[in-house]
Image: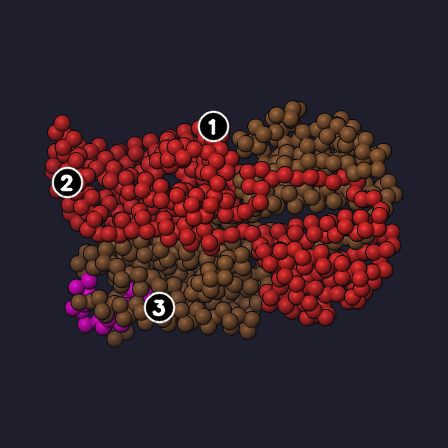
Amino acid sequence: MWANIYALLIKEFLALIKDKKSRFVLIGPPIFQLFVFGYAATFDLNEIPIAIYNEDQSIEARDFISRFTAAPAFTEVLRITQHQQIAKVLDEKQVLAVLHIGQHFSRNLLIAHQPAKVQILVDGRNSNTALIALNYMQSILANFNLDWAEQHHLTLPPAQLHIRSWFNPNLSSRWFIVPGIVGLLTLVVTIIVTALSIAREREQGTFDQLLVTPLTPFQILLGKAIPGFIIGVVEASFIILMAVLWFKIPLLGSLLALYIGIFLFVFAIIGVGLMISSLSVTQQQGLLGGFLFIVPAIILSGFATPIANMPVWVQNFTLLNPLRYFLVIVRGVFLEGFSVENLVNQYWPLVIIGIVTMSCAGWLFRRRMY
Amino acid sequence: MMSQMRLKGLIYKEFLQIWRDPSSLAIAFVLPVFLLLLFGYGVSLDAKQVPIGWVIEKPTSSTQSFSDAFNQSEYFKPVFFTDMQEAKLALQSRKINAIIRLREDFSRQVLKPQPAAIQIIVDGVDANTARLISGYIQSTWSKWMNHQAEQRGTPNHMPVIAEHRIWYNSALLSKDYLIPGLIAVIMTLIGALLTALVFAREWERGTMEALLATPISTKDILLGKLIPYYLLGMGGLMLSISMAVFLFEVPLRGSLWVLLLTGSLFLFVALGMGLLISIVAKNQFVAGQIAIIVTFLPAFIMSGFIFDISSMPAAIQMFTYLIGARYFVAILQTVFLTGNIWAVILPNALALLIMALIFFALAARKAPKRLE
């Protein structure tokens, strides 16, 4: 029996890698995407273009403005001299925000007993960037106020916040996203390997040949599953290695916990891939099925947007998504130092998803054989 | 005349094929509805009702007024703890997203000239959410201080205050920004999925030889493949736009015609890319694999749909110029939320046109002219 499966495995591996383009598809893009996405997927503000509209030529105003232009999050690309220009530069996306300092800024700041007002105008088309930029500007302003009050012996505010963040002290998006990419690319590669495999045999007519061999349906399915498993685990290991060595993401938790997670995750994904594959008659259907799984699996996983922000019924729906559990595992092990006992609640749903999808794939495979 | 008839015949044949394997129709009409519903409800960056742990070591009237300021806000959901240890455990097990700790000397310190320290710990794993939460906390804190100052009759001691205005999306609803961009992601998928397999399929089934044996020119073969899928894709685009406007109530401030026109340019890019994949791959298996890799994830991550392009490192920004969705996302976000700003629309539309021409030129060059 094992000799049969071994022969089938060799055939499946050959089918995957004998074609130069197919071989390249499995190796090239995941590596390339890891590096490009690792840098591209960031919510951090970095040199966001802003414009300054300064009507007050005092030293105080200049000092105030330099706090903004010196911050790494912003870079001043424009000086505005007329009020009408504001709408133009925002409309045309030349800048994300305009900082407007009125004529009476320094007078109010130094003499009068009323606060000096400045105006911040933000392009809200990208609401997330707008909100973060605005928060950032507010905190620059708060620091200026505090320093000013101290220097001029004004009454200090009654309370002050000391904010610290755990697990990711510099709040770098990369620490959050790169471990997520481990899940993302493992998912895509494993689906690519499995989702079209049976449909291709059907379409090319080699499926019948496979059926007349002494292999049982279970063995055929195993022959389709094992290459996906090996490729998925190898790919995940490579990305983890790169995350640690290249992106310098701290890996605090136990490797054992991570690998239990990877095995269960790849197992569940293969189940889904083979299910799609046994359902589809043509490769176009297989491809469509692959997309219909990959896209929601990524969107509803918490990869880019938190699950907690979704409406409750969508949150319940995400419980079916294997990637959701894996992302908790991989981020927990990387950043929070989780070990096996912290993750039991993430493991067992993956086991159930894997068993259900695998049995469905087996059942569909046998039913659709004739 | 003859060639027109042949083209018609070819288009008719393609339509029959679409009709017989309904997965193409599903791609054009079911996929956009499914994806828009999924993204529209599933993707949100608005954190609301964030569970916040409170550790108030000695409750007094001033700690009360401080925590009330937070609990009235729709952004927070308070969870009270008696000591820091308990709260830290809750933060580690992700039951709460942040801890606010008021020490026992808080009420005394508030009255002294030196400010009282409020300790805040935020779960930083999701850096973006952490940043949003600390932003909310800061603005609630400054509101509380203004309120305190008013009550005591002392003038506001802020030397500088900012009044801010957010243009185009004043409520900062993430749906209004994500859903227009989403149309570009969906159209990328539809365009490539529709055409990625068409040539590969003919090769694999051996019908490519039959097609080449007819007197139809390469140009007509390409057009015959393109036109039916273009019509399907435009149907999908209109469906997506009407769902965005009517179901998700995203304001459409620019003109519909600009959207349709630039959308149709973008569709040419997506279809052209699919055709090229199909021609180069020659078998459906590889074509399908390439289509999965080059469409969804690049359009999702590198188009500016969710991650701001201007925050990416310069080298990565160069790569985004290769992603057709980037140009269409910029057009969509502007036309929906701002209006017909030609300074944004024209350069991006020009880029789409150039990309479409490059894809078609490559497809025509690589298109099979004879059997090898």
Mark number, residue B342: 1
- Report in which chain the residue with disc 1 lies: B
Q: Would residue B317 be found to the left or right of residue A59 on screen?
A: left
Q: Residue at x 41, y 32 (%)?
A: B258
CA separation in Å, label 2 and label 3: 41 Å
Which region shows up in magenta?
A: A207-226
Q: Helix or strand or loop: what does disc 2 sit on?
A: helix
Is B288 one of the magenta-colored residues? no
- Report in which chain the residue with disc 3 lies: A
Magenta stretch, main secondary structure class: helix
Chain identity for the colour brown used in the image: A
Q: Position of residue A170 (x, y in %)?
A: 64, 52
Q: Are marks 1 and 3 on the same chain?
A: no
Q: Position of residue B4 (x, y in %)?
A: 16, 30
**Residue pointed to by mark 3:** A357
Mark number, residue B211: 2
Return the disc, 2 or 1, that comes first in the chain's sequence.
2
Q: Would residue A29 be found to the left or right of residue A246 on screen?
A: left
Q: Quadrant of the C terminus of chain B?
A: top left
